[in-house]
Amino acid sequence: MYIKKILLAIVFLGLVVAAYFAYFVYTTMFSPNTAFNNERAYIYVKSTDSYEAVREQLEPLLKDINRFDALAKQKKYVSNIKPGRYEIRKGMSNNDIINSIRSNNLPVKVSFNNQETLEKLAGRIAVQIEADSVSLLKAMKDPSFLAESRFKEATALGMYIPNSYEFFWNTTAEQFRTRMLKEYHHFWNDSRKVKAKAIGLSEDQVMALASIVHEESKKAKEQPRIAGVYMNRIRIGMPLQADPTLKFAAYKLPKYKNTIIKRVLNVHKEIDSPYNTYKNLGLPPGLIAMPDISAIDAVLNYEKHKYLYFVADADRLGYHKFSKTLSQHNVYAREYQRYLSSQGIIR
């Protein structure tokens, strides 16, 4: 009888231990362990992150970080960190979370436009993917890459077609650059290449002119007409006389650092620079800013007309008045100069 009681006690104790172990396994692996109220949360794991860095991001999102630690060690996640952007949904168990952050790297949407320089583009991209602005800029300006891709530093900005793209968050600077070169070649399809050849411009020249057109007007409907003015000037050997190129040249000088030129003056027309299109015939050696796709296509499909001049319309800001003769242009130009003066804009 005594032995029977001992055996029963041992069996009971075993059942208790088994029950506790089952409870521990369930709560550790399968019970919900999220502490946030939103439907989902995200963590961003860097390529250099240790488990401690991941744990630091997870701790405020979880009810019990210690149970997560136990399972992470059991499943060997602590020594097998995967970089990327990961989603944690409300109500997930530790097991679900580990499975998600181990293998479900989610892409991010990377968007950019209107970046004036490679430096600003690098800064814009750096807030959207893991690569920092220094590594991005170094990759963008890498002489070997530019030579292999048939770009120069002056034309390199044209390789980055403004749009939205999907990338993995842990994309490196070199991977970003390589992908954008692929997108550039995709953009310059046979149709666009044929159009560029038909108007007598190379891809780089189209991009350079498009950057001027885009700086002149953000109105997509007006851009083909402005492009037509510049194509007319190129055709007859007239200087482009594009004010945005003067601003670009000026901003490269110490004198104009940290200034905003609101009114182009005669002094700006005397700046010694290959980007001064009042002094130099033809297109500048590179882009003065990043053009929108609308401006690029405006150059490729420029409006055929006889206008040689245009000036901002004081009555419809953002739009322009176009002229076929210098005398008519001067009338419109004086109107706009009077408007600037009335607004106290003198430089």
Image (spheres, rainbow, N blue to C red):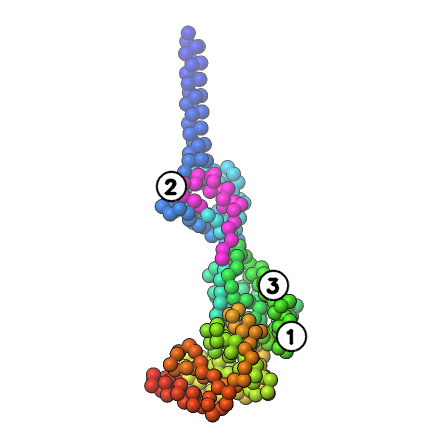
Q: Which residues are magenta?
A: 88-109
Viewer-nearest residue: 221 or 145 = 221
Residue 186: mark in rendering: 3
Label 3 neighbour load within 10 Å: few <14, some 14-19, many 20+: few
Q: Quadrant of the N terminus?
A: top left
- Amino acid beneath label 1: Lys
Q: Which mark is residue 197?
A: 1
Query: Between tags 2 and 1, which lies in front?
Result: 1
- The residue lying at 41 percent from left, 9 percent from top is 2
Q: Amino acid at mark 3?
A: His
Classify residue 340 as left or right of residue 185.
Answer: left
State which quadrant residue 159 falls in. bottom right
For residue 272, say whether it is visible: no
User: Which of the marked residues, 2 or 3, is nearer the chain's N terminus?
Assistant: 2
Q: Nearer the viewer, mark 2 or mark 3?
A: 3
Is 19 placed above or below 274 here? above
Residue 63: mark: 2
Q: Nearer the viewer, residue 264 or 31?
A: 264
Q: Secondary structure at mark 1?
A: helix
Numbered badge on residue 306: none
Q: Position of residue 326 (x, y in %)?
A: 49, 91
Q: From the top left corner, tell me how far across and down residue 259 is, in percent.
A: 41, 79
In the rendered image, the quadrant that contains the C terminus is bottom left
Q: Residue 278, can we see it?
A: yes
Q: Secondary structure at mark 2?
A: loop
Q: Please report the residue visible at 40 percent of the width from the left and 46 percent of the height from the top.
A: 39
| Residues marked 3 and 1 touching at CB (< 8 Å) | no
**Depicted 290 relative to depicted 3: above or below:** below
Q: How far apart are the two marked residues, 2 and 1, measured between alpha carbons?
A: 64 Å
